[in-house]
Image (tube, rainbow, N blue to C red):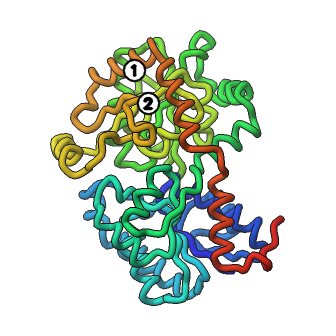
Amino acid sequence: MRYFLIAGEASGDLHAAHLMRAIRLRDTEAAFAFMGGDKMAEIAQCAPIVHYKDVAFMGFEQVVRNFFSIQQKGKLVQKKLLDFAPDVVIPVDFGGFNFRYILPFVHRHLPQTRLIYYIPPKVWAWKKGRVRTLRKFCAETLCILPFEEDFLKQHKVSSLYIGNPCIDAVGNYYAKHGEEVFKNQLLAQCTSIPSEKKDSLVAILPGSRRQELKSNLPLMVETLRTSFPHLHPIIAGAPGLTTEDYRPFIPNDYPIEILFNSTYTLLAGAKVALVTSGTATLETALIGTPQVVCYRAGGARWMNWAFEHLFPIRYFSLVNLILDRPLVKELLAADATPLNLRLALQEVLDVPYPIMEGYHQLRSLLGEQPASERAAKHIVESIIPPSNISIE
């Protein structure tokens, strides 16, 4: 069968790649076309139609400034959809793009094609009107947060909780390496770590977009430099970015090593992490590293107003949302100041145990079922009779 996937961020590229691998195990003749990144390309053995880094713009200003470029990429993906004629289309998160360019287009021009949304956008958090769009255009939605299934079903959207792919990714990594190997790898990879600071590492995860770096990395770096000179920070380089993307925000007199393709290794060896909200907060929790979440996107006053009036949710990070309580400290918009970050980080360093206990509860709520395998089984069986499925 023919599968067309659309992912627009580093996390979507990772989750879509795991899904593609699981699909291929069940459908050995699977053919893929996709918008995404390098991890998806590795599985599909072909280049993406559009690389996610060419459409990964954050914030109203950035989207408006790059509107015509995004529109051009959207039309290119639409053309390839018609050329490829897939049996199933699988949008992966990235709601702004998929809701505009994929869902209505597939409904109108490929009416016989099954559309299954994997990792639907967080319509429970904001833009609840998009629930109607999911209900109208999608045959099914496959959810990765426990509370999403009930929310969507209440709004008459066919949905299924299939587990969380972060559990798969972290579990596979630990099974392959083991915790001690993680730490040894980190020390071997990072030549800048003084021996006296090998137990005082700070993982910095400032986001996967350039705009996120600009808004968050200076705050993180300056707080560590001025208030925590005894700690040794290392930045987890995001896929799709380069060392040069980070350099403008790192002072010459405070060099920080940037480690690419080893985020889990870094987190496992770190004493604490500073994380920009997103999938990274959940991955950090599953690895078991205490964290502080801080998120700025420019225009702090506007963002404060938005958090108070536009987002009908009590928490921002996935960890707190799933637990429905403030386990990890969230510093958002105008609250993300050097003073607040210093106080929050010091508290985590002094008393990490409540966070670690909360992480255990988080794991039990998420469950241990392999998300990508369950999603692949559901997708393949929805388009191929079970008697014709061959499992390698």
Q: Residue 5: which quarter of the image?
A: bottom right
**Three-letter amino acid code of the residue under disc 1:** Leu
Residue ranking furthest to the top? 196
Which residue does the image show at 59% across and 33% down from the upper left?
287
Q: Residues within 10 Å of mark 1 (few under 14, many from 20)?
A: many
Residue ranking furthest to the front? 154
**Three-letter amino acid code of the residue under disc 2:** Leu
Q: Position of residue 199 (x, y in %)?
A: 59, 15
**Does the image show residue 312?**
yes
Secondary structure category for the residue under label 2: strand
Label 1 near label 2: C-beta < 8 Å? yes
Which residue does the image show at 29% across and 56% down from the upper left?
126
The residue to which callout 1 is attached is 345
Which residue does the image show at 35% across and 21% down from the upper left?
344
Which residue does the image show at 70% across and 62% down from the upper left?
21
Image quarter where the C terminus lies is: bottom right
The one of 316 and 29 positioned closer to us in this rendering: 316
The mark found on residue 274 in the picture is 2
Image quarter where the N terminus lies is: bottom right
Residue 307 vertical position relative to residue 294 in the rendered view, above or below: below
